[in-house]
Amino acid sequence: MLTLDVDSVRAFVAIADLKSFTQAANLLGTTQAALSLRLKRLEERVKRRLIERTPRQVRLSSYGELFIASARDFLEAHERAVESLLLAKKRLKLGIGCHLIGSELQSMLAKVNEFAPDLVLEISTDTSFQVKEAYLNGELDAVILRSEDERKEGFILCIEHYSWYASPSFQYSPNEPLKLATLDEKCGVRDQAPMLLKRAGLKSHNVLVAGNTDVINAAISAGMAVGVFSQRMAPKDSIDVGELFNLPTLPTSSIELHTHLTDQETRKVLKVICSVFNEYTAEELAVY
């Protein structure tokens, strides 16, 4: 298969346009001897004389006339290919469990922007189950999700410690059912809460079920109910009422990173993203 050298074709086009070896050499920043060598290499490659050179003029040969348009197209295609690589931006498709990121989001984005300002970061949020399914289907490069599974399939970023949180104004009597506000997303810890209360001889009932943490936070701040939160995600104006109300201890869960990416640059970005989680040491990712 015949292949063409870009520099040789560029030399041919420059000579054809300027009709001068001297001017073409100056344009390309080379010597006349080097330019002549490139042209000779191209003519030997295509087995045709492309430039006619006499003491008085430099002009295209009949084969040169046939080749010049294709030569220009060849150089333009080469330039487009190179430009596409130079302008291409690194993309990272990241899935995050929608109830995992709170105030850390702004800090995370600021750190990513500082570390990799040219990165195109595509963030998808959904339930931990859904983002994991998307990852397993190859739709995401990496996911950060909550897991109550004893089998730790990903890299543990931090352990989430849970408790019962309420407004300081919330009133509770052990003789009455504990009012709860909960998310409708399946969560092993929250799902166990009513059972743990029952085992402790305490009654409870849901007074609010919502799919958005903002709604739950508002209910807690309004003194409407008690909510189960990780210490990291508890509303700022709430207090831990677990000990105050003599409520049972809640189990922990882990936040995990799952990724199939191996290139070092992207993994460095993931370290930056994961470093926002309080108990996570970024250097540990190197052994994952």
Image: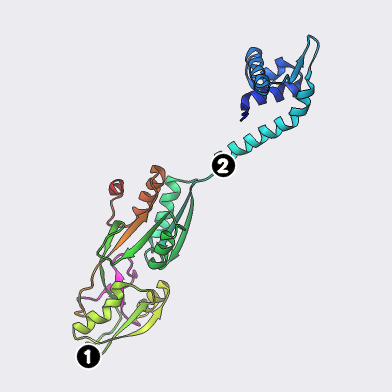
Q: Residue 175 got which mark? A: 1
Pair 2/1: label in front: 2
Residue 181 pos. (x, y %): 35, 80
Q: Residue at x 32, y 82 (%)?
A: 180
- Position of 258 compared to 10: left or right? left
Q: Is disc 2 placed on a helix, strand or loop?
A: helix
Q: Residues within 10 Å of mark 1 (few under 14, many from 20)?
A: few
Residue 76 pos. (x, y %): 67, 35
Q: Quadrant of residue 102?
A: bottom left
Residue at mark 2:
87
Segment tinted magenta in the rendering? 224-242
- Position of 85 compared to 69: left or right? left
- Please state which amino acid type lies under the numbered disc 1: Asn
> In this orientation, which residue lies closer to the viewer: 81 or 184?
81
- Position of 36 compared to 231: left or right? right
When the figure is inspected, residue 252 is found, relative to residue 207, above or below; the finding is above
Tell me the distance, in whole angstroms, between the alpha carbons under discs 2 and 1.
67 Å
Q: Magenta part mainly helix, strand or loop? A: loop
Disc nearer the start of the sequence (2/1): 2
Q: Quadrant of residue 176?
A: bottom left
> In this orientation, which residue lies closer to the viewer: 285 or 231?
285
Q: Residue at x 23, y 70 (%)?
A: 251
Query: Which residue is farthest top?
Result: 55
When the figure is inspected, residue 8 is found, relative to residue 77, above or below; the finding is above
In magenta segment, residue 236: yes
Q: Is disc 1 placed on a helix, strand or loop?
A: loop
